[in-house]
Image (cartoon, rainbow, N blue to C red):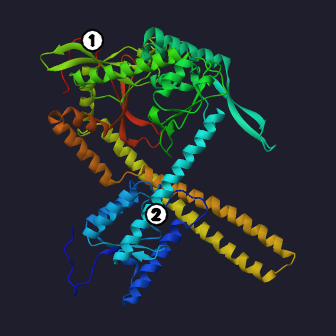
Amino acid sequence: MPSPKQKDSPDQRKIAIYSRKSKFTGKGESIENQVELCRERAKFAALQDGKVLSEDDFLVFEDEGFSGGTLDRPSFQKMMQAVRAGQIRMIICYRLDRISRNTGDFAHLIQELEERGVAFISVRDSFDTSSPTGKAMMMMVSVFSQLERETIAERIRDNMVALAKTGRWLGGQTPTGYASRAVERITEDGKARRLYQLEQIPAEIELVKLIYQMFLDTNSFNQIETYLLQKHILTKQKKDFTRFAIKNILQNPVYMIADAQAYQYFNSLTDVFSNEAQFDGKCGVMAYNKTKQKNGRANEYRDVTEWIIAVGKHEGVIPGRDWVHVQQQIAQNSKAATEGKKKKSRSNVALLSGLLFCEHCGDYMRPKLSQRWSAEYQETIYDYLCETKEKSRRKNCDCPRANGNTLDRLVCEEVKRLSTDGSEFLCQLEAAKVQLRGQSDEQEALLASLQKELESKEKAIAGLVNSLAETGQTSAREYIIAQIDALHEAKKALAGRIAELENMAGNHSISDEDFDILVDMLSSFAASFEHMSVEQKRAALRAFVQRVDWDGETAKISFFGAEKAAAGESIYQYISPHTSPAAPPSPH
């Protein structure tokens, strides 16, 4: 908490302006308008006290695309950090609900601001925390803001309940096995309405049945994944099936037949908005309010107790008894896997996880720890195995394993060798620096020429605009407008070319300082690597190694730091480790 200010000492803290808008709608006050209104309010209040505020007195914090239902907003959190650091004396917002729609959050905020001596003003609501009446009014408005938010949430849920009763498909990516079909219907008031419902795709439905049957038989995502990879069966998006995609199919209630077992299962967990008689085994199940949809993030599944269940218009394919059994088995497997991870004591000492790729198929190679132990080097013996090879049981790839201990050691030795005087890497880096510097000089000359040409175009446009004002409605008007349009297009092309050159210069230049820093990093790497922990060694390798490709006999290391200017190839080095199963010298 900042120390109390003396009466004769001016408060050097800033005025924070906070603005928020959930999304751009073209309606309501924009972020810019909110900020300007807040600034005018602060300046007017200061003038009444005989003070003049400058732009330096303000700090502006803006959040766009964030809801008022939570305080977890980036700019808001930055503002509160400034408050806690004693940098803010007042917060001004356009309207109270720009800060929060939650009564609890708002109450805690006002309490914290009061403890830190920070005033709070809402422009639209015309009151502030400097008076007891203002504090009381703020709390009342906050209550109504939260009431509005909860009312909206209830309205949304009521709409979902109404939709659930129709059993319609609401749109979006259709699940495997189904397509969306438009159906016309006439409402009670005689209007034609178009609804959508799911329609089976026979070939995909057979695949869904196969996945369910295989899981009931094997209780294994891995075996299903291997089978689908070996048969080259792809998802609806034309990608290889993963365990995640298989699990989504197995947990989607859309495939469940709406029978007695389905009703008993969901009725014990959540709200079912179709009566028991409708669960007659003729249609499938529809689940609404199943996911939390957030912009820029993958959909997150809600707990089943929040779902809204109804009988759909589509045909289900998996009997309720089988679907419920699959869910129970998945839950048991998940619990067993969690307990197994807790008991697992062996640590992963592999250094190239995430860096090593199979040159045959392009997939990752992951470490596979053995049961053998090297007493001499005090570590587990491990190999690197291609994931595609493992998942497809050698059907889609048969790249030989790499001895992990040996490969890790040799890659580390190659990185250490980069820092030696006269090393091939440093020679190539120096050559690339010189060549790129020459290219940079040429680019600067071209950039200056283009900028002059751009200025010439702008002057020509300005002259034509002046001529256009003088011509009035004459026959020359259209000719001048055509010239302006042509010059404008040429100007846009020049601006694009200038931006491209500036971007190239920023991305590809290697300064003497950058070169020296890289050499120092390499020297430090070589000197201290043996004393690092496994985690530190992984991080250090990632500073220099872009990727390692393994073809079964030879590893190709691609390094960060430079490019061959002429050919544009990554600087790389080949190593040929032995792949015998004997325990190698340890890189750890």
- Residue 489 on image: x %, y %: 69, 61
What residue type is disc 1 on?
Ser
Residue ranking furthest to the left: 376
State how far apart marks 1 and 2 are (Cα): 68 Å
Report the residue marked by disc 1.
Answer: 580
Q: Residue 63 carries which label?
A: none
Q: In which quarter of the image is residue 417?
A: top left
Q: In this view, does 281 lie to the left or right of 443?
A: right
Q: Is residue 31 visible?
A: yes
Closer to the camera in the image, 273 or 391: 273
Percent coordinates x, y for residue 48 in the rendering:
40, 89
Q: Is mark 1 on a helix, strand or loop?
A: loop
Mark with earlier residue (1, 2):
2
Which residue is drawn at the image coordinates 57% and 24% (left, top)? 235
Q: What's the residue type where badge 2 is placed?
A: Asp
Q: In this view, does 5 lie above or below 251?
A: below
Q: Which residue lies furthest to the right in this view?
A: 475
Nearest to the eye among marks 1 and 2: give it. Answer: 2
Residue 22 relative to residue 311: left or right: left
Q: Which of 433 and 65 is in front in this view?
A: 65
Does residue 65 appear anywhere in the picture?
no
| x and y, in percent, of residue 213 in the image | 52, 11
Instruction: State the residue at coordinates (12%, 16%).
Output: 375
Position in image of residue 469 (x %, y %): 76, 81
On the image, numbered disc 2 is attached to which residue? Answer: 97
